[in-house]
Amino acid sequence: MSDAANTMKMLFGVAGIYGAFMYYGVLQEGVTKWENDAGERLGRAWFLNTLEALANVIIGAIGLMVTGGANMKAISFQKFFLTGGAQVCAKSFTSMAMIYGVSFPVATLAKSAKMVPVMIGSILLVPGTKYTMRKYIQVAMIIGGTVLVNMAKGSKKEAASEGIGLAFLGIALVCDGMVGGLQGGMKASYKELSGGNSIKPYELMTFTNLFMLAIAFAVAMVMGEFLSGMEFVLANPELLLKVSTWALCSAIGQSFIFFTISTFDPLVTTTVTTTRKIFSVLLSIFLHGHKTNELTWAGIGCASLGIIGEMTEKKSHGAKDAKAKK
């Protein structure tokens, strides 16, 4: 394939990831804060994530059919259940954090520090585990920057509600930290059952979201969110359009991620998704009018440097691994 064709494919993937997920972030903030004429909000995080997972299952299944179907003998439903459960909990608790007043910039920056629970768990449970000073500094910069952005608001009017939101965000961070290990086990199981083949991108997307859908729907039904949520969005067409577009953006964005992973080195995708978070924060500030001051920008700068440090560290490790294989 020519360099020009490669460049066009990369631009296509990058534009898709940026476009879909930056608009997804804008819509997510709009959906959680939207009010009808009576001042009522949707809330219902598990209902929202049921719809998001459903959109991802539909798009994933279409992609799976186009790319030749799934190897059902290699699919471990137990491991997909655990992976999907961790991911849907992370997403739902993040939505709950925003419903309880945590701003999108704070939630996005904080979620970039998902190495924190991984590091703490490894140090406590695996004797002899060590991390480099660079890793500690990067994580500290992300956490410190997030704290500065949150402090910069300076308002105590909804402090109690936001405190609950921050607690939910902490739970989401723990769930996010579990995903990598669970996905690693699931991929290893697939490779063993398939005779050495790696899992295909749309298999990962479809079956992960299928279990996310099942879990989110079950929780939404038990908590009484699903039927009341459907009633609320159907009674408010403007919100219905926002929610539908938000869920579709998630599915399209994931498809572009899988396209980029399958076409280029995974580190390309890591670079794109990492920098996208920073631009999503900036877009949210400008579109939603979040109050900013010197402390806000200092926090964003500090967290961004930590995030970029994580990205460059992964790239350098990837380059070393590639040389070692040669």
Image (tube, grey):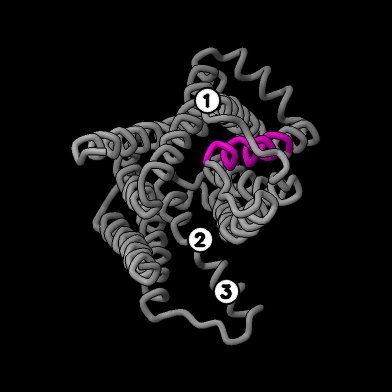
Q: Main secondary structure of the magenta part?
A: helix
Residue at the far left in the pictured view: 4
The residue at which mark 1 appears reads as 66
Between circles 1 and 2, the one closer to the viewer is 1
In the rendered structure, which segment of residues is drawn in magenta? 201-214
Q: Which mark is residue 150?
A: none
Q: Quadrant of residue 233?
A: top right
Q: What residue sits 61% from the left and 47% below the top?
A: 87
Horizontal and vertical percent position of residue 163:
56, 55
The residue to which callout 2 is attached is: 114
Residue shown at the point (33%, 52%) measured from the top left? 271
Which element carries disc 2, helix, strand or loop?
A: loop
Which residue, given by chain and number where applicable, does mark 3 sit on? 120
Q: Residue 241 in the image: x percent, y percent?
A: 50, 17
The relative height of residue 158 versus residue 202 in the rendered view (above or below) is below
As drawn, 133 above or below 44: below
Q: Residues within 10 Å of mark 1 (few under 14, many from 20)?
A: few
The amino acid type, in three-letter code, at marker 3 is Ile
Image location (x, y in percent) of residue 155: 42, 51
Could you tell me the amino acid type at mark 2? Answer: Lys
Going from the N terminus, do you reach mark 1 or mark 3 first?
Answer: 1
Q: Nearer the viewer, residue 247 or 225?
A: 247
